[in-house]
Amino acid sequence: MRDIKVVIENLSTQGIAIDNAQTLFLKEFIKLDSIYKPPSFFFSNNSIGNLYLWGPVGRGKTMLLQALQDSYFSDAGQFHFIEFMQLVHKKLYDFSGNSDPLMRVVKDLSNIYKIIFIDEFQIEDIADAMIIGTLIEALSKKGLRLFVSSNSHPDSLYKDGLQRDKFLKTIDFINEHFLVHNLLGNEDYRLKEISRFDSSSEDRNSDEYIKNFLQIAFNENITNSTEFSVNNRKFRCLGCSEKFLWVSFDDFFSSPCASKDFIEIIESFEWVFINNFHACNDEYIDKLRRFISFIDIAYQERQKLKLFYNPNLISNLYAGDLLNHLWVRTESRLNQIASTKYLQNLEKNQTK
């Protein structure tokens, strides 16, 4: 039987302490795993080997599944749902000359993997709904285990979707053949960790340190993310994903960006991170104007925002004269954003 201590110790080495709800989930999974028996050539069985972990954003679902994989299933396949469906569609295209290409995909995946982790499971259109329904049932019957995370209970998948009645059989299958576990609690694990991050020391503002921190917080490799698109224009960045954007103050606000770009950024990304700050005088007036505009919009829209710099820099960030009438308000907002209460208050408002 696998030992929960292995997972907890592995997380501890990353500076992660799990809460009671997360511990309860791990215990339930260990119990499930200990009694699971895969089907064989001669015998099929009804023991549940699949997992469906659901709960609110930021509760640590991805982190927990990653910890299980790192601790026990290092050779498993790991995909974001969108990435997984892209793989399936590519394989369907490759097997398009066969009489039943989807079953060829099932056979191919079951030959490669014994376990597949799928993060942020969601159904957006009827085509994916029909494909994933057949795929889940067929892979499970082949003995391939599926460990899935989602923000929604299975009963809410593809809610109000076109011809959803055709997907109800899949929902029933998930409820019957998966351990469906609700990660209870309203605490946003990721928000809590980010709000507590102390960037007052110089080494904690470095690109390398922040990259490592964000990779742990979001469980994503951001090494190759060097640009992003806004309003059909490309800008350089230090990292980005579907959830966050990380830019350099020095680089991004020196580029020809404007308020419409900032609005698009805030609508597109849950989080924005900024580092590489430096003191500015009136020689940098265009950069400061853009930054002031961004802060105004982000503050107004209650954007999840983390600025990595020594808090003492705020009072010295602008040392010019021409923007004093605007900078007074911006400096006040920066002081609020720099406090841990800024993000904690966002969390409280989100849970009301």
Image (cartoon, rainbow, N blue to C red):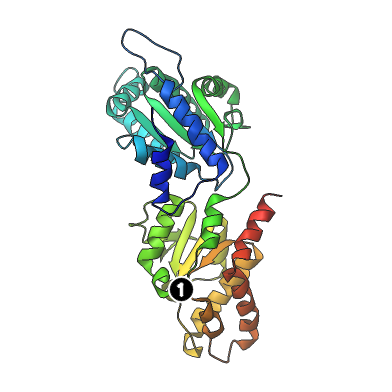
Q: Is residue 53 above or below residue 291?
A: above
Q: Image height check: is 219 above or below 337?
A: above
Tell me residue 5's x, y (percent).
42, 39
Name the image quarter holding residue 222. bottom left
Which residue is most to the bottom? 321
Instruction: Give the x, y percent position of residue 320.
Output: 54, 90
Question: Considering only vertical position in the picture, is 312 above or below 139?
Answer: below
Q: Nearer the viewer, residue 290 or 176?
A: 176
Instruction: Please say whether residue 284 is visible from this viewpoint.
Output: yes
Of the pair 290 and 74, the residue shown nearer to us: 74
Report whether 66 appears left or right of 268: left
Relative placement, left or right, of 261 versus 30 is right
- From the image, which quarter does the N terminus lie in? top left
Q: Residue at x 33, y 25 (%)?
A: 105
- Judged from this view, the residue extending furthest toward the right is 352
For residue 3, what is the image quadrant? Answer: top left
Mark 1 element type: helix
Question: What's the residue at 63%, 55% (across, down)?
Answer: 347
Alpha-carbon neighbours of circle 1 within 10 Å: few (<14), some, or many (≥20)? many
Query: In x, y percent, where is residue 323?
Result: 59, 86
